[in-house]
Image (cartoon, coloured by chain):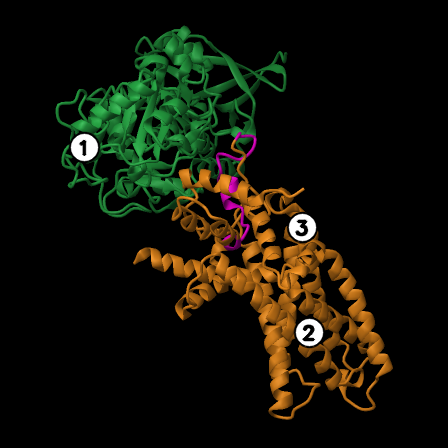
Chain colours: A orange, B green
Amino acid sequence: MQTDFLGEARRQAEICNACRYCEGYCAVFPALHRERAFSDGDLTQLANLCHNCRGCYYACQYTAPHEFDLNLPRALAEVRQESWKRHAWPNGFAGVFDRSGLLIAVGLVVGFALLFSLARGLRPEEGEGFYAVMSHGMMVAIFAPAFVLPLLALAASLRSYWREVGGGPLRLRDLLAATRSAGRMRNLEGGHGDGCNFEDEGRFTHARRHLHQAVLYGFLLCFASTASGTILHYVFGMEAPYGLFSLPKLLGVPGGILLSIGTAGLAWLKTRADRDLSAPAAWGGEMAFVLLLFTVGSSGLLLYAATGTGHVGWLLPLHLGAVLTFFVLTPYSKMAHGFYRMTALTREAAARDGGQV
Amino acid sequence: MNDAPETCDVLVIGGGNAALCAAITAAEAGASVLILEAAPKAYRGGNSRHTRNFRCMHHGPLGPLIEDYTEEEYLADLMKVTGGRTDDRLARLAIRTSEECLPWMEAHGVRFQPSLSGTLSLARTNAFFLGGGKSLVNAYYRTAQRLGVRVLYEANVTHLTLEDRQVTRVAYSHDGQDKAVAPRSVVVAAGGFQADTDWLARAWGPAAKNFLIRGTPYNRGVVLADLLEQGVDQVGDPTQCHAVAIDGRAPKFDGGIVTRLDCVPFSIVVNKNAERFYDEGEDVWPKRYAIWGRLVAEEPDQVGYVIIDAKSLELFMPSVFPPIAAQSIEELAQKMGLPPAKLRTTVDDFNAACGDTSAFHPTELDGVATTGLTPPKTNWARPITEPPFYGYSLRTGVTFTYLGLKINERAQCSIGGTPMQNLWAAGETMAGSILGQGYLAGFGMTIGTVFGRIAGKEAASHAN
């Protein structure tokens, strides 16, 4: 049976719009209060602006047992989840969102097995460090398409999203405003700067914000590490392995540490938070995704620590298998939220600006 | 039943803003404090959970407040709504103390936000709670818990034993058991009696059965009645209360802020016979919304019907329930259960009495008035001609009653004018000491915070 998530979100948004007490919490409420009636596109945009901090829920005078039964974080989470499926490209992959937990597990096993057997079967005759296990050419052959194709799919999804929420021409200043907001995770500050009460109704903390920032910046550092390695390799002809005081390691080691700590922390918070304030069906997939990122970060660190030992033989396929799974599932897993969130923040920056003119 | 009642320094009866301010103040003064809250945890906080701001005197910007709001201006605003029916000394005490309350509230976990969209007129006078009153209540419970205050939910106080102007024992039921506590000091902050519709009906007549209660169903006035029966001094008129006209489809209890309707100035309002009964355009809505509760209460079946047309739909804050819509006045009448021919005549007469509407201005007194119509509409009088037509039913929504406990400037209750030794009152239960009639937005929270803190301090110092 299809649940009318948009209808439920509309019902709740209309109550919120007559109340307005939560205006200062985050970007969702000023955006909501600008509307008088809520189209599907409006609700989709609000849903992707929501960071699920739950400040509004715990402050709400209309949550159950009140007959209005408001649970805006959950209503928006359901719409958000559904919007990602609706905009999935190719659309036949929409169902992956519902099974992303399982597919992450399968992907890990298959990815590991694939890379392990490739490494065994096509072991390079020469090469240093991990290139002794798998050649550079082999890695590029696998990872270049696995990186580029999902990004193209995601771009198609975001374009479709942008159309649904009525986005106009993309402006640099809106993009910069969105980047500033995401960089600080302003919407997890709670409006008062005390943080949110995601994991504990009774207390405001910056735990989720700081851990999420660790993941974000850790991830970006790891990405920068790989990019710097690519540049060193192709532009300067400097091949891995790199020493500790090389750019890839200086970026990658702190990146891996941040990513591992951040994901472990977020997974822990997730076990403490009330599952009914988000989309319960998506919980497993989200948790699997966080743990996948943890695997990416920690196996990368272990791989470095194991340099020169026999453990590289299984750690390398594990790490690469995790990265491969992560890349391939990016458009159809929780990872998509970062891209949609940035798009929603950009759209909001434009709308806010437009409202002031 | 337990023979030896438990003891504590300060017992606070009630669990809203005033009760929590008293409990926190007493606990910080070193007293052991017990709160008996009648509501379950999910509904704790009485009417405070529905509030949104705190009216505050200030010199220069303070927290979210801009410019100045002086004692004299504040008092003048209060005098205007109460028609002079207020205790000048207590009113000035509340106003003067409000300024130091705001930083105190912040220090105890309350967070403010800029004036909400649609309420810019209050940016100078009223500090809005981020997240509203429930978040304030949550913050105070957090603080109280940290200070070691004990809280019992679903604890219904049934009787206070008075001996020689002193409370010696407080009986309550909790968890299906009758219990008792023998506190050194008692603070009553249990609100008005508006949720007891029988009591309302005694004051208002059977009409009160049709009233909606905007806030908590737990303010039944049990403690108030118990104390008044034992001769504790009372203040206020039982028919006086804070009542506004709200959406007739609102729930019987706890509808809170969202059920208000701001469209009256742009409408005509008729009773169930499709007749107009009052000037809808008398003044801007924030200054008039509090009288419409009474106006509707005086009409047959205590119901009114607001009629607007398409051109006014977006001039007011969105309503929680969509309006009833129709393509003709007759169809609208049918849908709303009004006599169609009569409504047609009323609308036609009104339309014919409208004149030049070019000066129409939705947020100012524009003087766009009817001529030769009784009652007149003195502002925003535009003919109702443009379909679709929209309607809302209006009912009287009671916020809180003013009949309560008379207190002095130390928040002490008295018997025959002599202060009691260990009984204080704060919040809506004593607000009648200051509000003889009428209401000023955000003043209920001022009274609760100021007198809650006074009561807590006095109660703790008596206990020590």
- Front position in the image: B428 or A178: A178
Residue to which mark 1 is pinned? B379
For mark 3, give the secondary structure.
Answer: helix
Q: Which residues are magenta?
A: A48-67
**Taking B4 as reference, is A179 above or below it?**
below
Q: Are marks 2 and 3 in contact (CB under 8 Å)?
A: no
Callout in the foreground (2, 3): 2
Q: Residues within 10 Å of mark 2 (few under 14, many from 20)?
A: some
For mark 1, give the secondary structure.
Answer: loop
Residue B389 x, y percent position in the rendering: 34, 33
Q: Estimate the spatial distance between the alpha carbons at disc 2 and disc 1, rounded to whole Å.
A: 68 Å
Residue B55 x, y percent position in the rendering: 30, 36
Q: Estimate the spatial distance between the alpha carbons at disc 1 and disc 3, rounded to whole Å.
A: 56 Å
Residue B106 x, y percent position in the rendering: 40, 43
Q: Are marks 2 and 3 on the same chain?
A: yes
Left or right: where B319 falls relative to B65:
right
Residue to which mark 2 is pinned? A146
Q: Residues within 10 Å of mark 1 (few under 14, many from 20)?
A: many
Residue to which mark 3 is pinned? A283
- Front position in the image: A80 or A74: A80
Q: Quadrant of residue A124?
A: bottom right
